[in-house]
Image (spheres, grey):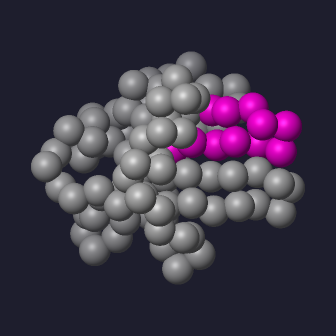
Amino acid sequence: MLPDLREPLVRQLAESDLPRRHWRAADDDGGLWLFESVEGDGEQWAIRQIEIDAHRRVHRYWWRHLQDEHGFLTDQALEIWELTEISQEAFDSVWELAG
């Protein structure tokens, strides 16, 4: 597998002091997606992502784990009009439980 060239940028955003926002979305298959994002160039970019599939398997992605055989940290700006904003506490509690 080739090295993921996104790592330095995602790490830089994740370690920055930029304000964080947190989001959730459900898919048509019964899965749930959670994101932590920061703004860059006027768009929200995911720096941490949780995927919970319909079978309740959980996958976490961030700069230290950008991809695996199940999926990857999104490489596109978030379309926030399709997401529901949630609290940092809600996101962090799922992140910790999934760890």
- Name above or below for residue 10 compared with residue 60: below
Front in this rendered view, residue 91 or 42: 91
Where the N terminus falls, by quadrant?
top right
Q: Is residue 4 left or right of residue 83?
A: left
Residue 25 position (above or below residue 55): below
Which residue range is magenta in the image? 49-59
Please report the residue visible at 55 percent of the width from the left and 51 percent of the height from the top.
34
The image shows residue 91, relative to residue 76, as above or below, that is: above
List x then y, in percent, for residue 16.
16, 45
Question: Can residue 21 be seen at all in this image of the molecule?
Answer: yes
**Would residue 21 be found to the left or right of residue 57 on screen?**
left
- Measuring from the top left, give residue 7's x and y in whole percent: 35, 34
> Which quarter of the picture shows residue 9?
top left
**For the view shown, which residue lies furthest in the top direction?**
1
| Residue 53 in the image, given as x and y percentages of width and height | 77, 42
Is residue 12 shown in magenta?
Answer: no
Please name whichever residue, 18 or 63, is drawn nearer the observer in this view of the structure. Answer: 18
Left or right: residue 88 compared with residue 99: left
